[in-house]
Image: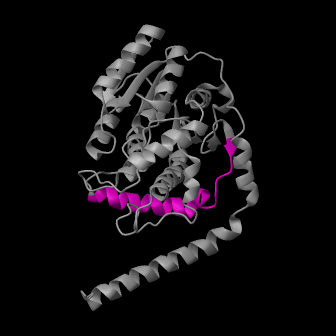
Amino acid sequence: MACVPYSDYRSGRKECTRDLFMINSSVKRYWPQYKWSNVLAMIRNMKRDPRRNPEPFRDKLVVITGATTGIGYYTARKYASMNAHLIMVNRDPEKSERVRREIVEEFGTPVDYLIADLALLADIQRVGHDILSLEKPVDVLIHNAGVHLESRRETPEGLEVNFVLHYLCPLIITRMLMPKYQRDRTGRIILVSSEAYRFAVWGLDLEDLQWNRRRYSGLGAYGAGKLAQIQSMHILARELAPYNVTINAMHPGMVRTESGRDNTRWYRWYKKHIIDKYSDSPEISAEALYYLGGSPEVAHTSDVFFHLTTEEELTPPARDPEAAEALWDRTRELLHEQGVAL
């Protein structure tokens, strides 16, 4: 039998002790703030259809990430049907060109696209620079690109894919566009989030944001990424407010998407035959995103989480300003190590 070095044993005990301390302190902090009414409200909202916006979006510019399939695809079609100009940010050139041709032929509206892998910091920054250089104001920016992974994957830069796509990508692009928003003085930003942020019940582990040390959990990592996204929204909303720009997060409903297609055969079977069977069409997500992007009823609403188009109270960790500031500071440090200024 191999022996575990005493130094490793002690190190493991220290990490375990730290984890227990963090969980206990989070429980003490958040448990008294949790309310059953919050969960019941979410369940009620699941039965509500999204509000609809009948107004056209003629000649306004919409940027959508991840627009070749699922929610992004149907959202691009919805905005195009209302005469918006589109810029898609996608990974696959062939799919992008196919969607572009389809939308132009069907709706006659201008469509362009940028090709980028939004799990890579270099591509994220390139996209940010490209959008920043546009003369036309970006009326709506929809951060939709996402992924659900059952096992941990790293980018060539050594970052966890889920963490980059759901959190760092929208954060970096939005921050890079601050000079443009300051100049144009208009815009709405929508984060396609998820009720799965609730899986991060006791908040984020700032010492292990990328699941290097803990056993990886697909739902846990996905929820943590969405929670980080929401916490950063609070700070971005404050910075964007002087420029007449709003930022909100929304749960797109339980809809059929291609998320998880790179997971195990078992997960793909489960998703196809169980999850998708009871899911709605992404068209309801598109209707909600069109409402949030164009309706005058929410023109001045910012820093809010919507279940489709219904405002919803956030869980205690998601509305904790101290946690948001701590995450912001830790993110600055992490990006500085990668040579990226936030």
Q: Nearer the viewer, residue 125 or 116?
A: 116
The image's colour scheme reads one colour
Indicate left or right for 20 with 29 as reference: left
- Residue found at the very far bottom of the displayed protein: 6
Q: Is residue 316 magenta?
A: yes
Residue 315 screen position, x and y as percent:
64, 57
Magenta segment main secondary structure: helix
* Segment colored magenta: 311-337
Indicate left or right for 26 with 342 as reference: right
Residue 7 screen position, x and y as percent:
28, 88
Q: Nearer the viewer, residue 120 or 56?
A: 120
Q: Is residue 303 magenta?
A: no
Residue 341 screen position, x and y as percent:
32, 51
Quadrant (top left, top right, bottom left, bottom right) of the N terminus: bottom left
- The total of numbered circles placed on residues is 0
Indicate left or right for 27 with 102 as reference: right
Relative vertical location of residue 28 with respect to residue 227 in this rendering, above or below = below
Could you tell me if residue 148 is visible in this image?
no
Relative vertical location of residue 210 with respect to residue 313 in this rendering, above or below = below
Residue 317 screen position, x and y as percent:
59, 61
Q: Residue at x 48, y 34 (%)?
A: 142
Relative vertical location of residue 337 with respect to residue 239 in this rendering, above or below = below
Q: Residue at x 50, y 60 (%)?
A: 325
Could you tell me if residue 224 is visible in this image?
yes
